[in-house]
Image: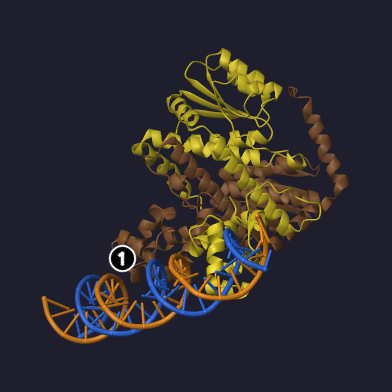
Chain colours: A yellow, B brown, C blue, D orange
Amino acid sequence: MNILEKITNELDMLSKSERKVAEVILASPSTVIHSSIAALAKQAKISEPTVNRFCRRLDTKGYPDFKLHLAQSLANGTPYVNRHVDENDTAEEYTDKIFESTMASLELARKNLDSNDINRSVDLLTQASKISFFGLGASAIVAHDAQNKFFRFNVPVVYFDDILMQRMSAINSRQGDVVIMISHTGRTKSLVEVANLAKENDATVIGITAKGTPLAKECSIVLSVDVCEDTDLYMPMSSRIAQLALIDVLATGFTLRRGSKFRDNLKKVKDCLRSSRFEKKD
Amino acid sequence: MNILEKITNELDMLSKSERKVAEVILASPSTVIHSSIAALAKQAKISEPTVNRFCRRLDTKGYPDFKLHLAQSLANGTPYVNRHVDENDTAEEYTDKIFESTMASLELARKNLDSNDINRSVDLLTQASKISFFGLGASAIVAHDAQNKFFRFNVPVVYFDDILMQRMSAINSRQGDVVIMISHTGRTKSLVEVANLAKENDATVIGITAKGTPLAKECSIVLSVDVCEDTDLYMPMSSRIAQLALIDVLATGFTLRRGSKFRDNLKKVKDCLRSSRFEKKD
DNA sequence: TAAATCATGAAATAAAATTTCATTTTTTCT
DNA sequence: AGAAAAAATGAAATTTTATTTCATGATTTA
């Protein structure tokens, strides 16, 4: 509930003097949050009690409380909405828009995620005898990334972005294996087939995809990162980023579940990489 | 700059009593914005002047001003602080923390990006006779993703996550080629060598890496997504997501620069993918 | 047009924040 | 270790800011 909006809405419920206050505030809200009640009264050419009454009419406790609300409204100056890139945007503009859209998607994805599903997924992953990540196109990157992460945990993990390899791998799966299918659309035919093959061969299939899609129907758990993406300019953008964040969540859940001893193992991998780097001089 | 983040950062610059104040605030910032200085002092079991001094140390004018800043930080729903995952977190908790950290990183990356550099990079990319993306480990995923995107533009683009292929490709580069090197640390020896080889062979080298690193020194343009990541639990997380967002920005800049006719081409690629999918029933 | 209601600001009061300064604690140097 | 210096802290005084009260003037209604 934005207080600036509220002022605009209730503008005609206000008395003449109070409206003066409203106008001054709307004209330059950022100035107001640094003004005392006296300063504001003076600027609106009315008395201090009027300002106070104005504040109360907007359901705030008083002037300081009103300023707090106002400050909050201003902070949302750049709400993380999906602002669309425009033909004539400058570099600065489209950069901001893309970053903001991405953040908006993450926010949305987080809200839609069910932590029970995450918990169950982590359960399954920690007990898996083998973990496979399958994706195609943009989702292949996510699968690739997942392999990179889980590989460090020293568990059997594979990733394929090749249809045939995926099929072969799926056919060879067995009870205790976990297959994670990644697809933004959830409608890619060959992936749905692979999911089905894996299921038929007793693997547990987890989908990182949209709910209610053909792929989702083949999965025991669906982790959906529904990100209202109109595949802007025909490229998947935010969806894969939300998927990656989800991979981070799963990987984190995995390490937490495995306990502290296990994490020493990660340190080993990390230390091992060090020799391939130039030293940092502090 | 988020004041909550600032408090966290400057925690060890504070005196003992001031830290008590910080702790009370961090524990429940939303309570504090409705407290008077006296109430806060009492809760932290210190005196009012100490609270005041605390506020000033954080570069605010005083307590009321501090509350204003705090209110603004809270307005973004959830403060995007880099909250660290804790051993005993529930699935819900670590999910939230990871998503929030990711969003915080994106916010930070956006702020640190220079739109002039972006502009120059897009210039170079649109004029390139060939574009190469090189990365290793977690950054390989970013390079992979970049290839996936630029491939759709119907421009000569390659991606390698293999040291030897990278070297060979770099040696064969020539004037007019653009090589994009991706590395979070900027210190991976073999990547620095590849960058140098490409430079020696007259290619333009753009780095998506941290400033002031050995890799950065080999680049004509450095697009830095410095994301204060302590490689939590020894896995790169937020950094690669910020890098991906940057790839989105470059790809978007590219399509915008190429104009509307060019975008029809993207539609063709997209339409061509359609037959591989199950139809969506509306 | 008189009575009633409402709006307004001056002044008084109350609350909150800030400054000053003396005391205590911590650090630094011998 | 012990003295001197520096820094931190809170009690009390002061200042600033906000709120309440109330008398007066404006506006509406019958």
Q: Residue drawn at (71%, 63%), measured in percent from left and top?
A: B116
Q: Residues within 10 Å of mark 1 (few under 14, many from 20)?
A: some
Secondary structure under tag 1 reads helix
Residue B242 visible in the picture: yes
Left or right of residue A85: residue A99: left
Of residues A39 and B88, the one drawn nearer to the viewer in this rendering? A39
Which part of the image, by quadrant, shows the C terminus of chain A?
A: bottom left
Q: Is residue B163 above or below residue C4?
A: above
In this view, B116 is above or below B84:
below
**Picture coordinates of residue B223, whole percent (x, y):** 64, 58
Using the rendered view, name the quadrant where residue B198 is placed.
bottom right
User: Residue tagged by mark 1?
Assistant: B17
Count how many numbered circles sit on residues in the image.
1
- Position of residue D28 in the picture relative to residue B10 (left or right): right
Observer able to see residue B173? no
Residue at 39 percent across and 44 percent down: it is: B86
B134 sits left or right of A274 in the view: right
Q: Position of residue B265 (x, y in %)?
A: 84, 40
User: The disc labelled 1 sits on which kind of residue?
Assistant: Ser
